[in-house]
Amino acid sequence: MKLWLDADAAPRDVKEVCYRASDRLGLETILVANQRLQLPAGYAHLVAVRVDGGPDVADRYIAEHAAAGDVVVTADIPLAALLV
């Protein structure tokens, strides 16, 4: 199981909760955004993926790479509907 984070729109507080959960559970956590992400130090299970700019590019990346049983954190209702 992996934790995917739609990092373009996720509030800082939500990201921090995901970072702590990743560390506590030893869960690979992938942050996907169309801009450069600065990952906080000390979290061994975080990975950043930068995608090309444009509408819904990060959403498409997550939809194409997430697998059954993965958890996706997003505020994007169309992405959530596609994943369900």
Image (cartoon, grey):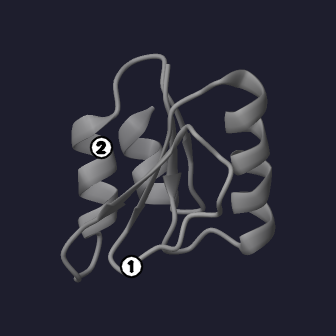
Q: Is residue 27 left or right of residue 84?
A: right
37, 67: nearer the viewer? 37
Q: Which residue is depicted at the point 27% across and 79% down?
A: 55
Q: Position of residue 18 (x, y in %)?
A: 70, 47
Of the 4 image quadrants, the one containing the C terminus is top left
Q: Position of residue 25 (x, y in %)?
A: 72, 23
77, 43: nearer the viewer? 43
Q: Which residue is depicted at the point 68% across and 50% down?
A: 42
The label on residue 36 is 1
Q: Which residue is depicted at the point 64% across and 63% down?
A: 40
Q: Is residue 52 left or right of residue 4?
A: left
> What type is the residue that disc 2 sits on?
Ala
Q: Which residue is depicted at the point 65% across and 46% down?
A: 43
Mark nearest the camera among 2 and 1 is 1
| Residue named by callout 2 | 63
Q: Is residue 33 left or right of residue 23?
A: left
Badge 1, how many Cα within 10 Å: few under 14, some, many 20+?
few
**Vertical arrangement, residue 71 with respect to residue 82, above or below:** above
Q: Which secondary structure lies at badge 2?
A: helix
Q: Which secondary structure lies at badge 1?
A: loop
Q: CA distance from mark 2 to mark 1?
A: 20 Å
> What type is the residue that disc 1 sits on?
Arg
